[in-house]
Amino acid sequence: MTEKTMSKFLQIFKIEDLRKRIFIVLGLLIVFRIMAAIPIPDVDTSQLQGFFAGNQLFGFFNIFSGGGLSNLSIAMLGVGPYITATIIMQLLTMIFPRLKQMYYEEGSAGRAKFSRWSKYLTVPLAFLSGYGFLQLLISQQVIPNVGFAQLAGDTIIITAGSMILVWIGDLITEKKIGNGVSLIIFAGIVASIPGTIQNAIATFDPTVLTTYIAFIAIAVVVIAGVVFVNEAERKVPITYAKRVRGNKMYGGVSSYLPLKVNQAGVIPIIFAISVLLFPQFFAQAIAFFSSDLSKTLNDFVQDIFNNQYIYAAAYFVLVVVFTYFYTAITFDPKEISKNLQRSGGVVLGIRPGEQTAGYLSKIITRITLWGALFLGFIAILPNITTIVTGITFLSLGGTALLIVVSVALEVLRQINSQLIMREYEGFE
């Protein structure tokens, strides 16, 4: 750590307002961790560890919820239902023009309304997810069969826990230290690291020491690659025409439009996981009509996804497809072209309007290919590591790694921007 970096780090704790914000955020994250350790009433968790160890999909969600899922805690769903609700709402913007106008054109008020509707949708999604998951555990004889009243009560508790986490996420976001939902996921992933290290030490095999060393080296390279690709962007040069307003002249400057290689973030990975989980929940829903058919479908799905090669191939394809799909939702070349034209900006060598939109669309299609392949590789990295080494716990959590790096960089950017703002104010 350089002297300049250390000086900036110390400034964080010298500024009273910033220091209070950081401690409040840490306190809220501690509340989340306490919730993740409180199990729902009357549930025996002794058989859960084996279930999650043998099911990679639910094992991923267990890490995602900070271990709350394996404990059947009141926060077992984490902020997953809210993320799913947000994805559904963004997909609906492609169907309903009114939603698209509200999200993209009505500014902060429109986005606040959009977020509020997403929270309304989170409640039924959390209830259905909690109920379906408990039914799945009962059918797998992981937890004992309970009466409908207790099952409904546990589901309501789980739903309430998920909504409390959404509220905690909003409180964190208001402190402007980072995105609240992302920080909750970040805290859950980081909380699982000590257990992973402990497991690695307990099962250490000196005969495969070379494998451990190679794993550490690959981990360092992967972290560097995640940082590089996450920050990579294509800069499109923009020139603004000179305009005279009153006695002042505006414009006449050159800038650039940054197009990120990883435009979609981690949303495609989360969406792909949701799709992969759907067959299992569908098999459980069939139990209302035929328990034998449900068991047959569930065993069939388990056999398919327990095959590392089939699971990895399906996961990779879904991530690539959803990366293009989500990028098309969040990045509208026509809208950006209109905004540039209104502000007097033009792309060098390209005519404003349709040609600019086509040019931007061509660029985003090219760079999204690399972003999609990157996300796909990161998603199946644990499977590749397990197949190559044959050691199940010695797997690079690619998705978790991507989230941790992305959130850490975003927090550092926000803290740094606040430090720069206060330094600027100090010179006045």
Image (spheres, rainbow, N blue to C red):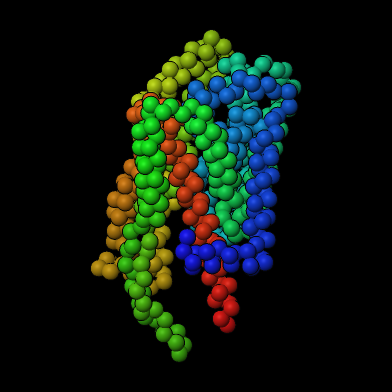
Which of 415 and 115 lies nearest the eye of the viewer?
A: 415
- Name the side, left or right, on which 373 lies relative to 3: left
Does residue 308 appear in this view?
yes
Q: What's the residue at 38%, 28% (across, down)?
A: 208
- Name the side, left or right, on which 166 lies relative to 224: right
Q: List x then y, in percent, for residue 372.
A: 35, 44
Q: What's the residue at 36%, 67% (across, down)?
A: 256
Does residue 159 appear in this view?
no
Q: In the figure, 381 relative to 46: above or below?
A: below
Q: In the figure, 184 relative to 76: above or below?
A: below
Q: Residue furthest top?
A: 292
- Dividing the picture into quadrants, the one containing residue 122 is top right
> Where does the C terminus fall, quadrant-wise?
bottom right
Q: What's the residue at 66%, 16% (across, down)?
A: 144
Q: List x then y, in percent, for residue 376.
A: 37, 39
Which of 194 and 408 lies nearest the eye of the viewer?
A: 194
Which of 169 and 54 lies nearest the eye of the viewer?
A: 54
Q: How many marks?
A: 0
Q: Residue furthest bottom?
A: 247
Q: In the figure, 118 relative to 277: above or below?
A: below
- Name the side, left or right, on which 393 lies relative to 334: right
Q: List x then y, in percent, for residue 322.
A: 40, 40
Q: What's the residue at 52%, 64% (across, down)?
A: 6
